[in-house]
Image (spheres, helix red, strand yellow):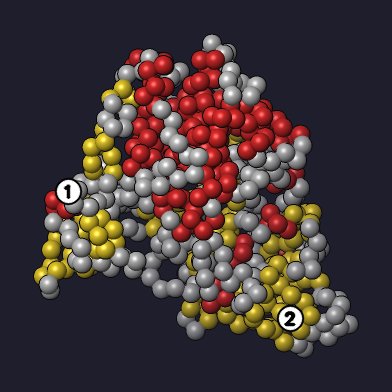
Amino acid sequence: MFKRVLLTALLATFLFSCQQRPESDISYEISAVMVDSVPQLKIKMTLKASPDGTTTLSFPNEAWGQEGLHKALGKMQLLNVEGAVEKDADSSRIVLMHPKDVEELEFEYFLKQDFEGGVSTRKIYRPIINKTYFHAFSHNIFMIPENARESEDILLDWASLPEEYTIHNSFGSKEKIQLLKDQDVGLFSNAIFVGGDFRVFNGEIQGNKISLATRGEWVPFKDEEVFKVLEETLTYQRNFWNDHSQEYFTVTMQPFPQENGSSFQGTGLTNSFATSVSNNDQTDIGQMVYLFNHELMHNWIGHTIKNDNEEEQYWFSEGFTEYYTFKNIAKNKINGMDGTFFIEELNRTIRDLYASSVAKEPNSKVNYDNFWTNYEYSKLPYWRGAIFAFYLDQKIQRISSGLKSLDDVMHQIYADVTTSDQKLTHDYFIGVMKDFWDEDFEAVFQKHIEEGQKVDLVALFDDLGLDYSPESDIYELGFEFTEDRKGIASVVEGSKAWEAGVREGDEVFSRSIWQGSIDHEAELGLKRNGEKIDIAFYPITKAAVPQLKPTSENVEKLGF
């Protein structure tokens, strides 16, 4: 089972006074300092020395799509012995050279923010350190000894930080001294750490603590609204899985400025979930409902139920997570969203899949290179998997006369992986489904997942007696950018972009595009023959794409 249960079962966090610091295998003492008028974190690290005179620390130079993370490092020095410190960016290591007879090292390093300007989605995964707060992930704040054991006693000493600083992280809140007993080092390396002017909201679900840490003045919603969404989401998801084993869970939410459109993202971590959200009136609480439900569902789908081959099973870990996001929200009416919301989200997913240029690609094309470099490939398993999950859910209910559903399949998989080392493979999933299917399920899986053929939604809707429209508007941008996105490479003749005046060879000096949205205009600032042209159009085209009608009859037939 994913070592979530760890989280407080394996770690014990205790409060100690500064005069009674407990012993540990590795300790970090964190202070806030100014170096040449630049706010920095000073981290004093105490660790066991390697007997060969060379102790190596892991500190990634590249991680989570970010490069050059070593630029955030300032002065580094050994404090208790003579020696040398070398930075090896190519191997993501910091090498400490010291006498061989030393048993323990005291090592000090400084960490600073290595970019100017405000926080953005591109900068959120770099350490953020300023006069009022800091925000960092384990891999870009704490160096880890490569000679560390799988589990160590780790001490975090925040006592030197200003008294008014809020301390909050994946292992507790507002604790100035934290001893993580027998801490899984891998899980420690996958956590969030914030401090400064954060506000913390706390609650309990069946005796288990939950927290929300946020900061800044939010424009689109109030803190209390977001905390209520978090509380409802975790309650209903844990009830669905019958899993209330996680004794502590926290969410951090950081605002960033954005003039046009809304943007939000989240990262699932040890005992926690870190989010960053655009702070403007185009962001709303409904987007937080979706974000929390999708990402927190990954505690089970993707984390407990692990893919055997990551990208190959993204149709499950992302697509089924997407489907259960819609279903969990609608079933439990989180933030007042009901069956109509489910239909709207299903319709949007159908439109997105049908509008995708890679909709018919086989599952084998959803590989590491394509998924992480191409937007449409990155979204394909979400869309395909969610529609496939809907199809299976409805068919299982029909086959069993309403006695079973896809929920039973998910519970069976969860039971299997928590009692053995079972991972999600295609053969395993097919084997489980055979107990819920009345025909050759392997052929169904081969057709819709392996080969990527679309589910016949018209036939399915007819079979279920659902009211639908046979065609709809779908997203079509109508042109391609040049590789550097500074020009127009090609335009689809007859498209809305073409009708609005976009032409091949135009230079692009500004753009505002809601990727995949048919409800917002695409706005372009173009330059042609030295003349500036402002163009706006709705990126849509009409297509034979079935859409469910949001009627009360459809809502009832779908079980909401």
The N terminus is located in which quarter? top right
Residue 523 visible at all: yes
Would residue 126 appear left or right of 145 to someone viewing this image?
left
Residue at the extreme right: 101
The residue closer to the viewer here, 457 or 133, is 457
Crowding at mark 1 (Cα within 10 Å: few <14, some 14-19, many 20+): few
Tell me which residue sits at (67%, 35%) in the image: 428
First-in-chain label (1 vs 2): 2
Mark 1 or 2, which is nearer the eye? 1
Residue at the extreme top: 401
- Between the C-alphas of marks 1 and 2, the distance is 64 Å
Residue 533 in the image, given as x and y percentages of width and height: 13, 63
Would residue 511 appear left or right of 122 to someone viewing this image?
left
- What is the quadrant of residue 437 in the picture? top right
The residue closer to the viewer here, 59 or 375, is 375
The residue closer to the viewer here, 550 or 445, is 445
Tell me which residue sits at (51%, 63%) in the image: 65
Crowding at mark 2 (Cα within 10 Å: few <14, some 14-19, many 20+): many
Residue bearing mark 2: 96
Secondary structure category for the residue under label 2: strand
The residue closer to the viewer here, 188 or 318, is 318
Residue 142 in the image, given as x and y percentages of width and height: 65, 67
Residue 24 in the image, given as x and y percentages of width and height: 80, 63
Residue bearing mark 1: 494
Tell me which residue sits at (23%, 43%) in the image: 540
Q: Using the image, determine if residue 131 lies above or below residue 433.
A: below
Type of amino acid under label 2: Leu
Secondary structure category for the residue under label 1: loop
Would residue 409 appear left or right of 259 to someone viewing this image?
right
- What is the quadrant of residue 224 in the picture? top left
